């Protein structure tokens, strides 16, 4: 095991498969983006309805 102060000697040591890497698929990212967009539209629609109701008072 190397000490913390030593620098890696090869590219293989820098780009190591032993490091934890988040495996997030493209489909999961797309679904998260879609959920964000739908939620944002719903919030704006709710604000518009509240504003419309306030103007009727």
Image (cartoon, rainbow, N blue to C red):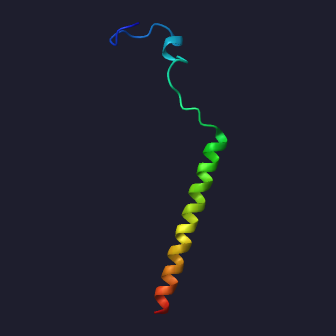
Q: Give the vertical position of 28 relative to 35 (above or below).
A: above
Task: Name, please, the residue furthest toward the bottom.
Answer: 57
Residue 46 % position (x, y)? 53, 74
Whether 23 is drawn above or below 12: the answer is below
For the N terminus, the quadrant is top left
Labels in figure, total: 0
Q: Residue at x 50, y 21 (%)?
A: 19
Is 48 located above or below residue 40 in the figure? below
Q: Where residue 3 sits in the image (x, y, percent)?
A: 35, 9
The x and y percentages for residue 38 are 60, 61
Q: Determine whether 39 is above or below 9 in the image.
A: below
Question: Residue at the location (64% across, 47% down)?
Answer: 30
Q: Residue furthest right?
A: 27
Residue at x-position 49% and y-position 12%: 13
Residue 23 lies in quadrant: top right
Name the spot of residue 11 as percent of width and height, x first: 52, 12
């Amino acid at each position: 095991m190397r000490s913390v102060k030593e620098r890696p000697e090869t590219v293989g040591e820098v780009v190591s498969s032993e490091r934890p890497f988040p495996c997030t698929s493209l489909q999961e990212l797309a679904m998260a983006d879609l959920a964000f967009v739908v939620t944002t539209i719903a919030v704006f629609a709710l604000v518009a309805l509240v504003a419309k109701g306030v103007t009727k008072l």
